[in-house]
Image (cartoon, helix red, strand yellow):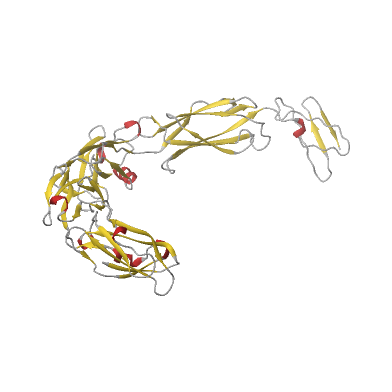
C-alpha cells in the first residue's frame, strides 16, 4: 500500500493517479481494485470509494480529494487488491502537486504486481536466404483487449504481462494485423501458470519493388546494380541488376527499404557516346529512394539527367550586305517557339526544365519564367520602340535550367533590331536663338542625314543630299 501526503490550497481539487504494472514495471495490469482511505482531517474515504485499473493501460485515478495548506496536510492510504496477487511497494510516503499535476516522484505511485507472469516472444520476417529481421512497434491483443502499453522493440521482441489466476488461467494472444499478415494468426488458450517464452509470430507477406535506371525518354545507357536494404540498415540487404532495357524487379519481405544505385556494371567501352561511369555514379552518389512495401508493391525509378539543349524554331531576319540581323517591327507581335531536348538521348524532349527569359525588346528589362511541356514552350515578343544609340540592337536571352540541378543549363541569346519610329516629342532639341531646323527620320532610309555639332564657336551645321546650307 502507498501512503500519500497532498499539499495545496484547501478544497476538493486533489488528485491521486498512476498505474498498475507487472513485475519489473513491465506492461500493465488491468482490473486491479485500488482502495483508498484517509488518515487525516477532511472527508473520509472508505471501501465504497474504490476504483479499478484500466484494462488497456493499467492506469487508475482518484479525483476531488480534500486537502489543506497547513504543514501537516492530508494523508491518504492506498492498497491494491486482485485475487491472491502480491503488490509492491508496501508503504511509501509521497506528495502531490496541487490541482492534481503529478511531480517527478510520482513514479513511486506505481503498483507492481510481483506475482505476475510474462508471455515472451518475437515478431519477425524471414527472407528467401533464411535471414530473419524483427518487426518493431507491433501492438498486441490479450483476450481481444488491445494492450496499449506493450509493443515490440527494434528487435521485434515483446513481453505481455498477465496476472495468474485470471480468466481461469486461459489467454488468447495475437498481434495487431492491420498492416501485416502473420503466421500463426493468433495463439489461443494459453494456460498461464509460469513465464512463457518463444511465442513467435512471423510476418509472411512479400511484395515487389520494381523500377528502372535510364536517361530521358527511357533511354537505356547500360546496366546498373542497385542496393536494396532495410530502412536504417540491418538484417535485410540485397542487390539487383537492371536488364537490357534498364528495368529491374525484386521480391522482398513487406516493410520499408532504402534503394540506391550502387554501380554501373556495363563496361565503359560499351556505353553510348557522352556517357561515363564516373559521371553516372557521381550523379547518383547521394540519391537514396525510400519505398514502403508494407501493404503493396512500390516503384523506385532512377533518372540520369544530362544538360539540356535549347534551340529556337524560327526568328525573322533581314539582310544588309553581308550582315544578317534579327528584325522585329514595332507593335507587331512575334511568336517564338523554343525546343528543349536532352543531350546524348536522341533528342529526347524535356519537361524537367524551366525556361528563364530576359527580354529587353519591349524597352524594359525583366525576367520571365516559363514551364516547358514536352520539350516545347511558346513565348510572345511585344517589340517596343527602336533603339537610337549604339548598334541599335536590343538583347534577348533565354536560359533552360534543370529543375533539380541548377548547374545543368543551356543558353540561347540574340540581339534584335526594332524597325519603327521614335515620336517627335521624345527627340531632345533646343533652339537658341531662333534657328530654323529640319529633323529627318532616324535612322534614315535614303542618303540624307542630319546632325548637331557643338564646338568652342557654338556653330551648327546641317547637310542635305540635294543641296547644302551652312551658316555660322
The image position of residue 355, as x and y in percent, is: 49, 35
Residue furthest bottom as drawn: 71
Which quadrant of the figure contains the C terminus? top right
Q: Residue at x 61, y 27 (%)?
A: 328
Which residue is rendered at x = 28% and y = 63% of the image?
110
* Quadrant where the N terminus is found in the figure: bottom left
Q: Is residue 111 left or right of residue 351?
A: left
Residue placed most toward the observer, 270 or 332: 332
Give the percent coordinates (x, y) of residue 111. Answer: 25, 62
* Side of 296 relative to 456 (left or right): left
Residue 47 in the image: state x and y as whole percent.
28, 60
Residue 264 vs 191, above or below: the answer is above
Quarter location, residue 272:
top left
Q: Nearer the viewer, residue 460 or 390?
A: 390
Looking at the image, which is closer to me, 157 or 54?
A: 54
Q: Residue at x 70, y 25 (%)?
A: 445
Amino acid at each position: 500500500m502507498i501512503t500519500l501526503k497532498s499539499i495545496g490550497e484547501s478544497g476538493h481539487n486533489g488528485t491521486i493517479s498512476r498505474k498498475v504494472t507487472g513485475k519489473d514495471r513491465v506492461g500493465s495490469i488491468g482490473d486491479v481494485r485500488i482502495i483508498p482511505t484517509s488518515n487525516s482531517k477532511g472527508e473520509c474515504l472508505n471501501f465504497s470509494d474504490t476504483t479499478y485499473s484500466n484494462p488497456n493501460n493499467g492506469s487508475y485515478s482518484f479525483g476531488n480529494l480534500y486537502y489543506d495548506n497547513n504543514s501537516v496536510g492530508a494523508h491518504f492510504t492506498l492498497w491494491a487488491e486482485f485475487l491472491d496477487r502480491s503488490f509492491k511497494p508496501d508503504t511509501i510516503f509521497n506528495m502531490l502537486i496541487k490541482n492534481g499535476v503529478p511531480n517527478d516522484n510520482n513514479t513511486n505511485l506505481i503498483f507492481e504486481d510481483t506475482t505476475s507472469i510474462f508471455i515472451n516472444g518475437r515478431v519477425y520476417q524471414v527472407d528467401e536466404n533464411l535471414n530473419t529481421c524483427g518487426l518493431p512497434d507491433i501492438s498486441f491483443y490479450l483476450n481481444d483487449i488491445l494492450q496499449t502499453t506493450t509493443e515490440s522493440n527494434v528487435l521485434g521482441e515483446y513481453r505481455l504481462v498477465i496476472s495468474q489466476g485470471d480468466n481461469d488461467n486461459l489467454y488468447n494472444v495475437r498481434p495487431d494485423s492491420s498492416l501485416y499478415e502473420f503466421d500463426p494468426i493468433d495463439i489461443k488458450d494459453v494456460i498461464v501458470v509460469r513465464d512463457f517464452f518463444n511465442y513467435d509470430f512471423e510476418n509472411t507477406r512479400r511484395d515487389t519493388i520494381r523500377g528502372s535506371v535510364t536517361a530521358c525518354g527511357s533511354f537505356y545507357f547500360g546496366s546498373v546494380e542497385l542496393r536494396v536494404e532495410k530502412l536504417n540498415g540491418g538484417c535485410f540487404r540485397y542487390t539487383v541488376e537492371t536488364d537490357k532495357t534498364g528495368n529491374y524487379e525484386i521480391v522482398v519481405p513487406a516493410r520499408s527499404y532504402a534503394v540506391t544505385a550502387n554501380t554501373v556494371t556495363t563496361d565503359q567501352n560499351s556505353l553510348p557516346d557522352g556517357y561515363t561511369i564516373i559521371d553516372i555514379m557521381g550523379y547518383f552518389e547521394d540519391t537514396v529512394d525510400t519505398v514502403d512495401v508494407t501493404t503493396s508493391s512500390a516503384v523506385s525509378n532512377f533518372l540520369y539527367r544530362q544538360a539540356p539543349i535549347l534551340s529556337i524554331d524560327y526568328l525573322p531576319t533581314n539582310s544588309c550586305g553581308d550582315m544578317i540581323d534579327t528584325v522585329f517591327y514595332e507593335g507587331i507581335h512575334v511568336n517564338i517557339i523554343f525546343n528543349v531536348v536532352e543531350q546524348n538521348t536522341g533528342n529526347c524532349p524535356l519537361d524537367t526544365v524551366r525556361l528563364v527569359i530576359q527580354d529587353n525588346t519591349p524597352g524594359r528589362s525583366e525576367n520571365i519564367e516559363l514551364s516547358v511541356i514536352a520539350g516545347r514552350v511558346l513565348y510572345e515578343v511585344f517589340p517596343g520602340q527602336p533603339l537610337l544609340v549604339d548598334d541599335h540592337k536590343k538583347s534577348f536571352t533565354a536560359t533552360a535550367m534543370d529543375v533539380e540541378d541548377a548547374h545543368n543549363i543551356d543558353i540561347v541569346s540574340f540581339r534584335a533590331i526594332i524597325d519603327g519610329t521614335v515620336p517627335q516629342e521624345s527627340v531632345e532639341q533646343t533652339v537658341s536663338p531662333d534657328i530654323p531646323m529640319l529633323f529627318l527620320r532616324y535612322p534614315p532610309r535614303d542618303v540624307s542625314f542630319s546632325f548637331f555639332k557643338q564646338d568652342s564657336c557654338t556653330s551648327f551645321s546641317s547637310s542635305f543630299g540635294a543641296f547644302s546650307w551652312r551658316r555660322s
